[in-house]
């Protein structure tokens, strides 16, 4: 594909177009191959123009990670809000399904934040950690609602720990699914997810 003619990208939306081009490059070549020069070439702009928005590759990677976590958190919140507030099992199922749906729809985003680290990149935890934590807010909210209603089966573990345990089990299955690493000896990823989620619900929550 030939570069876009220079001048077609205005300054007002150039940052967004850089991020969009970065996601496109990651989908083609993987996150480790992210190149500011290639992004500039694909956008038809001079490479130094990117440095007005991102100081280096790592700065761009951080922006992509933040966008991915914010997108995940938004999907989780929307799923929680879509279910009746008093129907805790429906809210839990909605959040669980939304988590997998988001990962399947945006595998590059999922793998960037949860997959193999990018060589040489050190994440600024003081910047990323608060946004990463917000992606669990919907799940924590539902678990706390179960606790307040006296419907937790496990009473000697705090609600945030329960939420973390649930996440690790869901995350593990989703990760091997979207990475095409499920063993070819059983059910498909969607069916396995539903079975595992039912087991989680049965283990931690009362009707």
Image (spheres, rainbow, N blue to C red):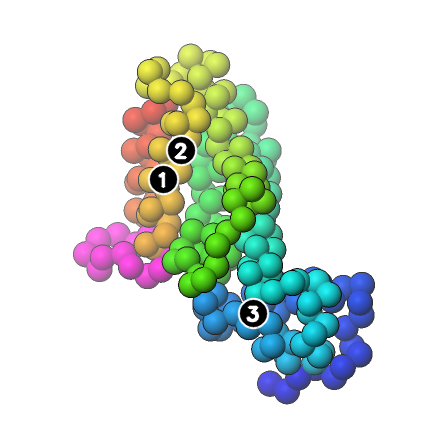
Q: Residue at x 66, y 62 (%)?
A: 54
Front position in the image: 41 or 145 = 41
Looking at the rendering, the stretch of residues picked out in magenta corresponds to: 178-189
Q: Residue 43, position in %: x, y?
A: 68, 76
- Quadrant assignment, res 197: top left
Q: Secondary structure at mark 2?
A: helix
Q: Can residue 78 be seen from the camera position used here?
A: yes
Screen quadrant of the N terminus = bottom right
Q: Are marks 1 and 2 in contact (CB under 8 Å)?
A: yes
User: In this figure, which residue is indicated by the disc labeled 1?
Assistant: 168
Q: Residue at x 56, y 27 (%)?
A: 84
Q: Are marks 3 and 2 in contact (CB under 8 Å)?
A: no
Spatial CA span between label 3 and label 2: 31 Å
Q: Residue 76, position in %: x, y?
A: 54, 40
User: In this figure, which residue is indicated by the disc labeled 2?
Assistant: 164
Q: Residue 32, position in %: x, y?
A: 45, 67
Q: In the figure, 203 relative to 193: above or below?
A: above
- Quadrant assignment, res 13: bottom right
Q: Residue 180 colored magenta? A: yes
User: In this figure, which residue is indicated by the disc labeled 3?
Assistant: 24
In this image, 191 relative to 91: left or right? left
């Amino acid at each position: 594909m030939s570069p876009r003619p220079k001048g077609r990208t205005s300054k007002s939306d150039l940052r967004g177009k850089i991020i969009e081009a970065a996601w496109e490059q990651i989908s083609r070549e993987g996150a480790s191959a992210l190149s500011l020069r290639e992004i500039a070439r694909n956008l038809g702009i001079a490479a130094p123009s990117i440095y007005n928005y991102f100081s280096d590759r790592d700065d761009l990677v951080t922006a992509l990670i933040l966008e991915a976590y914010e997108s995940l958190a938004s999907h989780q919140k929307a799923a929680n809000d879509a279910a009746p507030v008093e129907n805790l099992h429906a809210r839990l199922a909605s959040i669980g399904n939304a988590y997998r749906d988001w990962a399947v729809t945006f595998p590059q985003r999922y793998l960037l934040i949860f997959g193999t680290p990018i060589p040489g990149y050190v994440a600024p935890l003081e910047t990323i950690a608060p946004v990463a934590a917000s992606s669990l807010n919907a799940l924590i909210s539902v678990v706390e609602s179960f606790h307040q209603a006296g419907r937790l089966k496990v009473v000697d573990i705090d609600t945030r720990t329960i939420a973390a345990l649930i996440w690790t089990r869901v995350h593990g299955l989703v990760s091997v699914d979207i990475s095409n690493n499920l063993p070819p000896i059983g059910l498909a990823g969607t069916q396995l997810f539903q079975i595992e989620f039912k087991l989680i619900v049965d283990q931690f929550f009362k009707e």
